[in-house]
Image: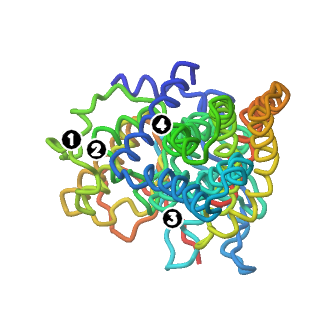
Amino acid sequence: MTDRSLARAFSLLLRRDLVINFRQRSECVNPVLFFVIVVTLFALGTGADRALLLSMAPGVIWVAALLASMLSLESIFRSDFEDGSLEQLLLSAHPVTVLVLAKVTAHWLVTGLPLLLVAPLLCILLGLSDEGLKTLMLTLLIGTPILSLVGAIGVALTVGLRRGGVIISLLVLPLYIPVLIFGTSAVQMSVAGFPVNGQLSMLAALLALALALAPLPTAAALRMSLS
Amino acid sequence: MERCGVLMSGPGQQRSGEPGLVVSDLHCSRDGRDLFKGLSFLLRAGELLVVEGRNGSGKTSLLRILCGIRMQESGSINWGGSPIGELGPLYHQEMTYIGHHDGIKGDLTVAENIQLAKALGKPSGDDLQTILKRLQLSGYNEVLAKALSAGQKRRLALSRLLATVSWLWILDEPFTSLDGRGIEICEHLISSHLTHGGMVVMTSHHAMELPGVEITRLRLS
């Protein structure tokens, strides 16, 4: 198979998933609504203490983003598993890792990118400064694809189980910790006026690592789940 | 005939001159119970193998092992002289599997499903209209697959056989939910694939009428 046909398979699969998600809109709207509601609940729950809210803001937004991303993870492979499309993907003429990457990319565009778009709204809600907002957007831009990539491994492992939901969170949430740490600390530092190059570089390194490595165990886990 | 030309140059046949699919001493068990043991057979160009056996005898498991989806306990499966596990995508591009599940997306139209099937395999020269016409689905291009009847969905699943060029067809109960005309179409697809030098492994509870085709039967007990 040529590189061109591989690129074509990648783009068609990516488009397929986007079209399917667009036709059943709830899939992409739910995580964003969840994200907004959780952050709003925190804002309401801490009462009138603005200083407390501001100091918690980066952590609250990032934890809400982790949970929102986790909620939507199952949709990466679940329906394909149930209707037999997953078998066809594994039996395709192309390397499974590339196809996995196409599916994860589609998942990020549908569930990760919208988080980025509503983040400015939440920053106003929590009283985060412009500098903080800029860094938050950057960390979300680099961080949320890592969540989708790493999460895909967990879904691939549990897609064969009838009720994999809780197990996914136990498998995946610990792996999200580095992203949470560097993401929140970058925002906190920038609010305090310090440079954040270190944290951003670490996040970018994690993204590069996840992009290169995560599709391999995901493909292997899918094979295991189907056999 | 262009189809035939593509088939004849397939590496599966020419790699070493060995017969297409060679299965030797295959052993498969499920939950500690042996489904089959010491199973050996070979399949050459133009041959049809029908796997028979009662429910639960391991027909589907055998087909999934032949595809490389499921792992066998022991034994080997060679395609053109090399183990299918080592060939990976090279084997899969010469093989088409149609399983119990149709493997089509309900939220995509008929045309989009076929386009995707083409992109995932080695696309054949047949265009969309030709494929739909042969399956008697003409006029359904823009219909969402979830709006099709069970029999029409099965026909759409069979469209993978026409949308891609492959040597080996592995079909698990291809006639399920097809009506009389659908069964005729499917039988015609199979016999024309065999006369072009293809190979078919299938399970079926339906007595097939394939004039001029010699059927090898494998009984699992």
Amino acid type, callout 1: Glu
Q: Earlier in the sequence, mark 2 or mark 1?
A: 2
The spot of residue A65 in percent (x, y) is 63, 50
Residue A13: assigned label: 4
Q: Earlier in the sequence, mark 1 or mark 3?
A: 3
Residue B51: assigned label: 3
The answer to whether mark 2 and mark 1 are in CB contact below 8 A is yes
In this rendering, do the residues under marks 2 and 3 share a single chain?
Answer: yes
Secondary structure beneath dot 3 equals strand
Residue named by callout 2: B109
- Label 2 CA crowd tier, 10 Å (few <14, some 14–19, many 20+): many
Residue named by callout 1: B142
Task: Kindly tell me whether residue B41 is visible in this rendering.
Answer: no
Q: Chain of mark 2?
A: B
Amino acid type, callout 2: Thr
User: Quick one: which residue is furthest to the left in this view?
Assistant: B139
| Distance in Å between CA atoms under marks 2 and 1 | 5 Å
| Distance in Å between CA atoms under marks 2 and 4 | 14 Å
Amino acid type, callout 3: Val
Q: Chain of mark 3?
A: B
| Distance in Å between CA atoms under marks 1 and 3 | 36 Å
| Distance in Å between CA atoms under marks 2 and 3 | 33 Å
In this rendering, do the residues under marks 1 and 4 share a single chain?
Answer: no
In this rendering, do the residues under marks 2 and 1 share a single chain?
Answer: yes
Q: Is residue A88 left or right of residue B24?
A: left
Q: Nearer the viewer, residue B132 or A110?
A: A110
At 55% from the left and 47% from the top, the residue drawn is A125
